[in-house]
Image (tube, rainbow, N blue to C red):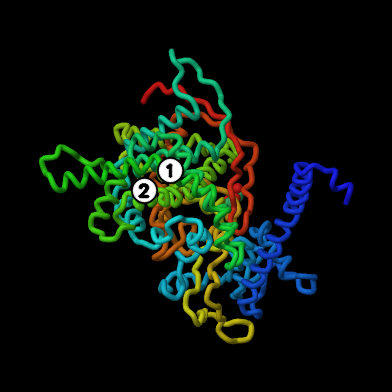
Amino acid sequence: MLAFASYSPPLLLFVFTVVVVTSGIFLIPLFLFTVTSLKAHREHSILPDTLPFVGKQSGQLLSSFRANVRGATQSARLFAEAYTKCSLNQIVSIVPTWTKGPQVLVPPSLIPWLSQQPAHTMNAKDCTFENMQFAYTVQHPEITHNDLLDLMIKRDLTKSVGNLNDEIVQEIQECMEELFGGDVEGGGEAEWREVGVWDSMIKLVARSANRVFVGPELCKNDEYLMSCVRWTRDIQVSGAIMHMIPKFLKPYVARLATIPNRRDTATNLKHSLPLVEQRIADMTRKLNDKTFDYEAPDELLTWMIQESFKRSTESERSAYSLAYRLLLLNFAAVSTSTIGGANAVLDVLATDPSDEVLITLREEAERVLAEHGGVWTKAAVNKLHRMDSTLRESARFSGVGGTGLARRVRSEEGVLLPIDGQDGKKVWVPKGATVGVAQAGIHFDERYYGENASKFDAFRFSRPKEDGSATTNEDLVTTSPNFLAFSHGVHACPGRFFAANQLKLIMANLVLNYDVQPLPSRPANTPLGDVMIPPIRATMKIKRRKRDTI
Ligand SMILES: *[C@@H]1O[C@H](CO)[C@@H](O)[C@H](O)[C@H]1NC(C)=O
């Protein structure tokens, strides 16, 4: 006691803090680990135990718990195993993911059935809502339930594809000059630069998409763009954290886990809100006063305000809610296209130089551009068959994988799958379970892609078109039961037409204006939960080309 008394209060406080912090460092992860694994265990326990649980080694101590842990880091292997051992033998199986709960995988023969289920029994959107935990990670969840943004993507954005190519190309070229260098004055030789593939692609995608969303000023604003990019990452990180937390803790954890989301939202709205408010004011004035000399620019923000004028609620009409929708739109558009673009660049650069993939793509882009008077019209982009094939092949080969055609069971009584289990009865899955197919299994199945299914073959889909042997349409945007990168059926990704056009313009401008050194090998994608993340630190060596003719 006496000894203690001689310590000064600040020192005691210091010792106390050290003890709390060190125990926190050990106890918080232990606590989180325990609650997340209990949650994973409970999610698995709602599923029928007659279904094979891939990754679980029976007899092993804590076997289902250990299987769940495997789901976090080895899901690619587990999905492949489920496909070959179960799906191909008409057996329904379960694969753990940890981050998204267990996935019920059905054989490919059930794809037509799965893609036709009504949304009130098996819902595709519920998977995204659940995975991203929108109820906790978006400040205004009601916005995500409203159809306004869906309509913009499905109707207006898709209708516009091709009309704004000049504007998109201008942003791509300016952005590339900033990132990779422009023409050297006096026609000299440019220097090689080493740049990040992911970082470059995210800027190119975000800037050119936002040219169409919000126009030429905001799309060049780096602080605005990077807040869109960061928010996209924030919501995936906080979504994954929230997913692992049991429901009773979510409101509390959400306050901490969404600090970055709220910070980046504030930065974002600081830039977009004034633009949205001004546009609403101008368009309203023009509606009431035909003599007002004003023409709203042709971009998504204008289309969205036009639609909002037909709506009645505050969450469909206020400048704030429309600005927030722009942020959600960025989430939908930027990360997916960046993954597609970065994978395609890496896949192309890792091909054997003697296959001349890059040179062939450049030759095609030069030829098509010349045939269309040097303008990237819609017709011109449609002629880039080899580029289209390369992007589709990369989406097949390096796609994010995981559960294709994922649907979350909504019916209270669960769903009977049209397939018998090992007990001879129809397989039943409960409400809240996720059902789908092993996407990578299908994408690498030799029955659909021939003996070279496991190889990246850039011109796999353009060859039949060019030699006249094509029997089916295999464009990048064409979904099928064998190509699930954009899902398939009524819930196929509605933004794919916009994204395909944008990615083709980015890739064409890359090969036309730059030399890029081949890579000795393909930097590997990494599994995280059930998805494959591209190597975000991979770099490429790039140099501005001297072009005699334009
Ligand atoms: C598969 O690849 C090998 C080696 O590149 C080639 O000889 C063979 O013809 C290919 N098979 C098909 C069906 O294209």
Q: Position of residue 470 (x, y in %)?
A: 41, 55
Q: Is residue 325 left or right of residue 33?
A: left
Question: At label 1, which amino acid type do we have?
Answer: Asn
Per the model, the C-alpha gap separating discs 2 and 1 is 9 Å
Evaluate whether residue 207 shows in this view: yes
Question: At label 2, which amino acid type do we have?
Answer: Ala
Q: Which residue is mark 1?
A: 268
**Rendered image quadrant of residue 218:** top left
Q: Is residue 89 left or right of residue 18?
A: left
Quadrant of image for the C terminus: top left
Q: Position of residue 95 (x, y in %)?
A: 63, 67
Along the line of sight, which residue is nearer the eye, 87 or 535? 535
**Rendered image quadrant of residue 444:** bottom right
Residue drawn at x 39%, y 43% is 209
Residue drawn at x 33%, y 52% is 158
Q: Which residue is mark 2?
A: 323
Element under disc 2: helix
Residue drawn at x 33%, y 58% is 315
Q: Position of residue 89 (x, y in %)?
A: 62, 73
Decide which of tag 2 and tag 1 comes sooner along the chain: 1
